[in-house]
Image (spheres, helix red, strand yellow):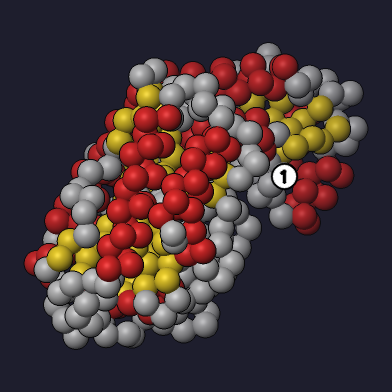
Amino acid sequence: MSMPHTPREELYGRIERFQKLLADKGVDGALILQKADLFYFAGTCQNAHLLISGRDEPTLIVKKSLQRAQRESRIDRIIPGDFDIVSKTVASSLNPAGKLGLEMDVLPANLFLKYKSSLSPLGVVDVSRLIRETRAVKSSYEIECMKESARLNHVMFSAVERILREGMMEVELAGELESIYRKNGHQGAVRMRGFNQELFYGHLMSGWNSSYPSFFDGPTGGTGLNPSYPQSAGFKKICRNEPIMVDYVGVYNGYMVDQARIFAIGALPCELVEAHEAALKIRTQIMKQGLPGTNGKDLYETACKIAADSGYERFFMGYEDPVRFVGHGIGIELDEAPVIAKNVNITLKPGMTFALEPKFIFPETGAVGIEDTFVVTENGLEQITYFDESIQLL
């Protein structure tokens, strides 16, 4: 069985950029153990620690499975070991009076206390922002991976017209579309970094359910099938003349794209059609403004102004508790940097990728809008995902 592996030069290029950031902050090294970060820096998700220091070869210390880690990772130094080996390797590699970085945004408190105690007298500091900064700018290799995910998404969206029918349950439509995903290589899992944030493929909802609130840090929610997983498709039957939002995350070889389109059987009320047109105007204007050097908060203000001019501002990005962003970074995780949000200073740089999702949520009626994934280039924004942007009337 042949599987794609992250090239060695790709891994070491990432590590070198991260090492420079560590050095700039006076941090002697970092210990990486979260799955997404391990995949990014080491090319494997086995149970392991990756020690990155400023002066030595990075060391991947694997508890399980060593055989798979050696097969999957292109890191030169891979050794077996449990936590005791990790502690000894850190102690022999770093200055005892130095600083060791940890992923404190995702590390559970009890593990943090364990590391802090066991690695003393080393000081421990948070390097999660440096990791996010490193990961925010994608290489050409990563962008090609995301374009593969976009092709996967196009296959899925192209099947909606063939499958969708009046009276079918949302979860039935979701199951058929997700089956197409899996048959074409979707890995299933959609990784998120935020605490208690989780997603299963994405959100698929119709009519009033696309305006149903949930905990999810996004403009839409959905009932889900039960309170244990209260989002996305439910047992609601799909009716005529209501919006059907398919908002799904394509994932191929670890890399994601986020995309949403609106479908309908019959026609939609005028206010929904007008709001959808406003969402398209927002996207068009942000594509014009999204040049390298642009501040993300200015793009957010542009989106809000167009929403206000449309007359549907009160429904923009949610109506009960609207989110204060219109775009989010994406890559190995769904919630990466940059975020295009209110009062968040972020400078767009070539190689950054984000999903832009201007949406309008009407209580008891439904949601309209669009979402696509973009990469910042030297000349502006390049759209990675593709499918007819208009409301798909069937």
Q: x, y percentage for residue 160? A: 17, 64
Q: Is residue 75 left or right of residue 153?
A: right
The answer to whether residue 95 is above or below residue 240 is: above
> Dividing the image into 4 quarters, which one contains the C terminus?
bottom left
What residue is at 17 percent from the left and 61 percent from the top? 392
The answer to whether residue 233 shows anywhere in this view is no
Residue 56, picture quadrant: top right
The answer to whether residue 209 is above or below residue 323 is: below
Which residue is more in the foreground, 113 or 147? 147
The answer to whether residue 102 shows anywhere in this view is yes
What residue is at 72 percent from the left and 44 percent from the top? 104
Q: How many numbered dots are placed on residues in this image?
A: 1
What residue is at 81 percent from the left and 36 percent from the top? 124
Residue type beneath disc 1? Met
> In what element is the residue under mark 1?
loop
Question: What residue did someone put label 1 on?
Answer: 104
Which residue is more in the foreground, 25 or 260? 260
Which residue is more in the foreground, 364 or 82? 364
Q: x, y percentage for residue 120? A: 88, 36
Q: Residues within 10 Å of mark 1 (few under 14, many from 20)?
A: some
Q: Is residue 46 left or right of residue 247?
A: right
